[in-house]
Amino acid sequence: EVQLVESGGGLVQPGGSLRLSCAASGFTFSSYWMNWVRQAPGKGLEWVANIKQDGSEKYYVDSVEGRFTISRDNTKNSLYLQMNSLRVEDTAVYFCAGGEGWLVTSWGQGTLVTVSS
Amino acid sequence: EIVLTQSPGTLSLSPGERATLSCRASQTVRKNYLAWYQQKPGQAPSLLIYGASIRATGIPDRFSGSGSGTDFSLTISRLEPEDFAVYYCQQYADSPLTFGQGTKVEIK
């Protein structure tokens, strides 16, 4: 069974940084494109970034380009999201999600990031 | 960026009724790489339909997807109590991947 477990969320001040992690199990992690998708409180889903199986390609939504960095460690079956220069509008539940292509077939339960002073 | 517009925003129906949800794209979705997800309160989304019309593993046949190009739809033939949720369409053909704003199917 595919399992994706996020961690690292919390309260951070505007301008601060946070690193999210996602631990994967139950599937061959190195064969999946991996994504971060977020959902602001009471709002819809927004794709944030994705990374190719070997880490050689990364894509971002414009609103986080230059501030967020997606990475992975296939030896540890882990996905990461380094978030810098955080803004109030980055407040959301962040989901780790993946699939064999760009189609997302599996999701974690999410971790809440709150950016507030 | 491909903008996806879902309608209606909210659908109020009774169990047993038919639900039809629409998703319109601002430009052609290549290869019909259009998916539908269901999300229940406090839960992660789950995949229902991909490739516009292919049911994901374990999805009951009361769920069906159709459409191509820029116009897509999700139909639930007979609503079960567990189907009341929010539904999102998503295109996974071009970066940035984009979602529609969602359609809430609520009990009338």
Image (cartoon, coloured by chain):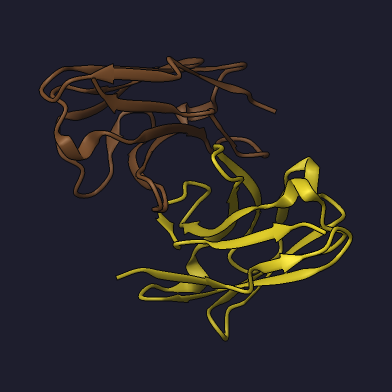
What color was chain A assigned in the picture?
yellow
Quadrant where the image shows the C terminus of chain A: bottom right
The answer to which image quadrant residue B47 occupies is top left
The answer to which image quadrant residue B59 occupies is top left
A14 on left or right of A45: right
Image position of B108 with respect to A15: above or below: above
Residue A81 seen: no
Residue A68 seen: yes
What color was chain B assigned in the picture?
brown
Of residues B82 and A34, the one drawn nearer to the viewer in this rendering: B82
Give percent across and percent down for residue B79: 16, 27
Which residue in the rendered view is the most extreme toward the front?
A117
Give percent across and percent down for residue B37: 39, 39
Image position of B89 with respect to B28: above or below: below
The answer to which image quadrant residue A76 occupies is bottom right
Q: Determine the residue positioned at 62% across, 35% down.
A: B94
